[in-house]
Amino acid sequence: MNFAQRMSYLGTETAFEVMAKAKALEAQGKDIIYLQIGEPDFPTPKHIIEAGVDALRRGETHYSPAAGIMPLRQALVEEIYNRRGIRPDVDEVIITPGAKPIMFYVILACIEAGDEVIYPNPGFPIYESVINFVGGTPIPLPLLEERDFRFDPDYFRSLVTKKTKLIIVNTPANPTGGILTKSDIEIIAEVAQERGILVLSDEVYKNIIYEGEHQSLYALPGMREQTVLLDGFSKTYAMTGWRLGWGVMPKPLAKKVEQLMINSNSCTATFSQHAAIEALQGPMTEVDAMVEKFRQRRDFIVAGLNKIPGITCRMPKGAFYVFPNIKDIGRSSQELEEYFLHEAGVAALSGTAFGQHGDGYLRFSYANSTKNIGLALEKIKFALEKLT
């Protein structure tokens, strides 16, 4: 078949490719420990499930408005006000099937061929993928290990040109688990306001944070008018399969995103949206317990990785990933991804899956049991001993 040239610019999420390889090995009888996927290993809280089931029984199985049902959009207005101190208009809120459509639609609506987009690197691979897909020019902003995977402010300023049309921010961050400080986001806001640049603030991990407080760029004075706030339900509420995300943005852009929804998805599943209202308004007991478990696993995996010769690992402050430095082992990130999968039976991701500045690192998700994490650490250590 002949495909459009644009398809050659579209990337992927390596986590799903590694999962496929791991499943194939598992089918051949090999034991695999999955530390590559960015998905909470906890069930969706029971009260949210019940709300979804109740909605199904009530017949909430038909089309909803493309922008989302009004009760959920109103609930999100209150959530944003309570968490960030800004009360958006309900017409600025768009519900999508997962958070990725917000990224895709905003970039598609705002970026022309040749426009520059500054994005974090190492970072979520879909940023660069979609920038390339629409003909934009991706400008990587290195996240530096020596700065706890934050950016250098002077270097950031040097990247901004008259062609810069969008800045992407992600905090807490995938894959590093790093968080930006208030000073960091104030620098971004200052530059964005001086140059009139739109900012896409990806805050899907905002509730999974262990040290300090979440700093939202959307909440800074004057930034509501030029920020797209991206968030969702997958990570906080262990609702990855429900496909629920949302964005808040200036009304003119919201209209364009709604138009893209109509042309692609029509709407987000109605019963899922009713479950989302319960997620926002119901008890956070199970969520808090999940985050505490993640904290314990974080401490455990960081301590274990730092005991393995050739590996050093900083303590992430958010999300549920570690991003250890493996440069002293003397093998590339891609080589070690393959080696650990086949030799140790541990599925991890090469840092290069998250961009050029991820070279020399691996990403492990600690969304797995402490028992399995401990076993994975033993297998990694043993496998590395065989390399020397």
Image: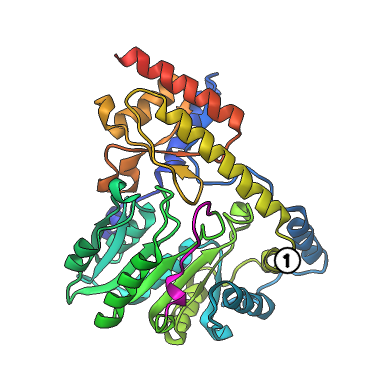
Tally the marks.
1
Look at label 1 and name its amino acid.
Glu
**Mark 1 Cα within 10 Å, few/some/many (few <14, many 20+)?**
some
Q: Residue at x 28, y 25 (%)?
A: 329
Splitting the image into 4 quarters, where does residue 81 fall?
bottom right
In the rendered image, the vertical position of residue 339 relative to residue 76, given as above or below: above
Residue 220: image location, x then y, percent: 43, 77
Residue 388, x across and y down, in percent: 29, 14
Q: Return the residue nearer the eye: 117 or 156.
A: 156
In the picture of the structure, the residue carrying the numbered disc 1 is 278
**Residue 3 visible in this rendered orientation of the protein:** no
Q: Compare residues 252 and 43 and report the one nearer the observer.
A: 43
Question: How was this image coloured?
Answer: rainbow
Main secondary structure along the magenta-highlighted residues: loop
Along the horizontal axis of the image, is 51 left or right of 325? right
In the image, 100 versus 38, the foreground residue is 38
Magenta range: 209-220
Q: Give the residue drawn at x 47%, y 81%.
A: 254
